[in-house]
Amino acid sequence: MVKGAMVIGACGSGKSTFARALATKLECSYIEMDKHVWLDNNSARQESEWVASVQQEIDKSKFFVMDGATPWAVHFTEHFETVIIVDAPTEERVRRVNSREKASPEFLDFILHYEDNPTCSLMGIISSRIYDENFLKTLKCRVLRVDGTKPLEENIRLIY
């Protein structure tokens, strides 16, 4: 069975940036779940469709680094040898999101309530500190935490 690492974290925490850099360092496949889940019009594909698409990416890999929302990760836990959660303060996450896109008020509210709302969701995706921490408790693989405000190379050295 193909094994890999899953990178999770709140919007704007730096999970995609970290996952891409880690995959480059490890010279392995990078699987960006957003590209499998979302259509161009910001609506989601059917779950069975995107799960099959991600599984195909995993199956053609020797090792992979994947990033995405925790509710999506639950479909692939048998493949994880490591799950990494990237953390960053709320203010920094909001700054990052605003620097890359014009965030809607709903999206900003979603980002702002990651820490304090256990059922915080947007477009059916739950993203909260409590949800992520409960997910981490269910895993049988190695779980690591990195500070998304630290330099990438410093965080990568902590992992492999």
Image: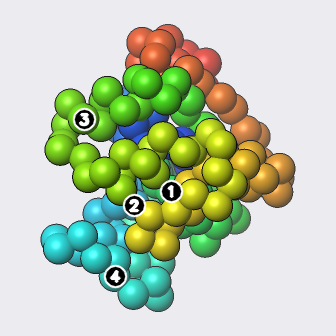
> Could you tell me how far apart the alpha carbons at marks 2 and 4 are, in whole angstroms?
12 Å
Question: Which residue is disc 3 drawn over?
Answer: 98
Question: Which residue is disc 2 drawn over?
Answer: 33
Callout 2–callout 1 Cβ contact below 8 Å? yes
Q: Residue drawn 69% across and 65% down?
A: 78
On residue 69, the disc is 1
User: Is residue 23 in view from this perspective?
Assistant: no
Image quarter hosting the C terminus: top right
First reached walking from the N terminus: tag 1 or tag 3: 1
Mark 1 vs mark 3: give the one in front. Answer: 3
User: Is residue 120 in view from this perspective?
Assistant: yes
Amino acid type at image mark 1: Ala
Disc 1: CA contacts within 10 A as few (<14), some (14-19) or many (>=20):
many
Callout 2–callout 4 Cβ contact below 8 Å? no
Residue 76 location in percent, x, y? 60, 67
Asked which quadrant contains residue 99, the reply is top left
Disc 3: CA contacts within 10 A as few (<14), some (14-19) or many (>=20):
some
Q: Residue drawn 36% across and 71% down?
A: 37
Callout 4–callout 3 Cβ contact below 8 Å? no
Q: Nearer the viewer, residue 105 or 54?
A: 105
Asked which quadrant contains residue 46, the reply is bottom left
Amino acid type at image mark 2: Met
Question: Which residue is disc 4 drawn over?
Answer: 45
> Could you tell me how far apart the alpha carbons at marks 1 and 3 are, in whole angstroms?
19 Å
> Could you tell me how far apart the alpha carbons at marks 1 and 4 are, in whole angstroms?
15 Å
Residue 52 location in percent, x, y? 44, 81
On residue 36, the disc is none
